[in-house]
Image (tube, grey):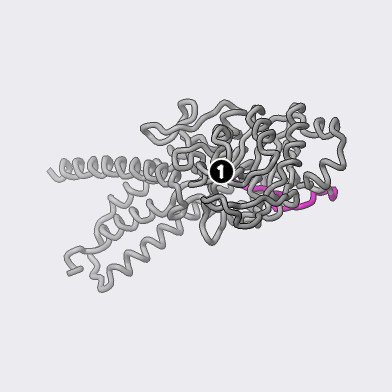
Amino acid sequence: MKQLVSHIIGHKHVYGAIIIAMLLVVADYIMSNASYPLLDSSDSLAPYAYLLDPEDGPDDEIVCVNVAYDKELTTVRDEFGDSLGSVAITNRSTLLRFLDLASNSAYRYIFLDIRFEDDLETENDSALFARIKSMPRLVFSTHRGLEDDISDPALRAKSAYADYRHKRLSGFSRYEFIQDGQESVALRMYRELDGGEIHSCPLGYADKGRLCHNTLFISLPLSATDTYGPNGEILHPHLGSQLMVKYSPAELQQLLDNKIVLIGDFENDLHSTFIGDVPGPLLSYYAYLALHRGNHRVNYWLYVFLFAIYFGITLALFGRMPLKIKVKRPLLVLALSFVGWGLVLCSLKIALFLLLSLDFCATIPAAVFSLISFYKKINIRNLS
């Protein structure tokens, strides 16, 4: 009879361990897609990304166009049409001349990290907007709540979100590809260049039938903070005073051939990241690169590995006999147990990241294992 009871209890432990391991794996996937970085999400690994610098020099597949000083004044008016003063915006005449040249090149893609807000009008708007609408493989940035403020409603089809969420301590490190149900700049580039498209599905998110992540840790190269290249070249040349002056039209078109062209403010539009201040246009570009490399696709072997680890730990915890100890401060014991499991799982998290560039959430399993351990170690009757 004792053997039968032991056998039944043993099977319950196995089934319970399987269920808990599966729930932890599902919870890890759900947490990885949270809109805001929660718990110990991927950006907690940002300090270790220094050891995984993906490149030593500037990317030779992009051309950066700096419009930080290509400005013009335009009148700002209130809802009654009265002038409120002037504001500096990107010089649309210079931008139009550049896009006219670019349209005759074999550029790969153009990202305009420039907003075309309503009521900020210039005499070049009609020609500029017509040029933008006529160019394929081009996107310009907008932000949450500002999509209705675009000067020409017909331009909205060329716009996508470029919002960056982050934690206060580590700065930007995670990118959300579908933002408030709308396509991000990186996702638009991925769709138009690679034919991929992240969409929601019953299990979460998918890309061409493959389960994937919608929010992803973006590994940034140390060179993303550089102003000059290894040979002293300017990485973000100014549009009007350098590119349009240094190169002839034919040379400029040749420079853009088969390149991804990033146009934006590389001096003032800076975002805090784990490697330092990085220009906004580069953040969207490296987010696109993560999609291009398939980093967003779920690594099933990781989840098989995590399931095995969680199952083994849970089964081991279930199999331990209560120690029957009397505890005066049970909450302290629970906290210490959580810290202990947290250290173990965080060590595994860091090791997987450094060795295989893989990541998982350690907080939830640490909490579950500490609760199981607490229950098994403490004589519940002595807590009252």
Q: Position of residue 85 (x, y in %)?
A: 63, 57
- The answer to if 209 sits in the magenta stretch is no
Helix, strand or loop for disc 1:
strand
Q: Is residue 317 left or right of residue 193?
A: left
- Please give the name of the residue rendered at 45% of the width and 32% of the height, measured from the top-left corner: 199
- At label 1, the amino acid type is Thr
- Please give the name of the residue rendered at 46% of the width and 59% of the height, measured from the top-left corner: 343
Q: Position of residue 284 (x, y in %)?
A: 61, 43
- Please give the name of the residue rendered at 56% of the width and 29% of the height, measured from the top-left corner: 191
Is residue 194 or residue 139 the one in the foreground? 139
Query: Splitting the image into 4 quarters, where does residue 242 fall?
Result: top right
Residue 273 in view in this figure: no
Q: How many marks?
A: 1
Is residue 32 or residue 243 the one in the foreground? 243
Is residue 289 or residue 340 the one in the foreground? 289
Residue 2 in view in this figure: yes
Residue stretch rendered in magenta on the structure:
217-232
In the image, residue 129 sits, relative to residue 284, either above or below, namely: above
Crowd class of label 1 (few under 14; some 14 to 19; many from 20; radius 10 Å): many
- Please give the name of the residue rendered at 57% of the width and 53% of the height, measured from the top-left corner: 82
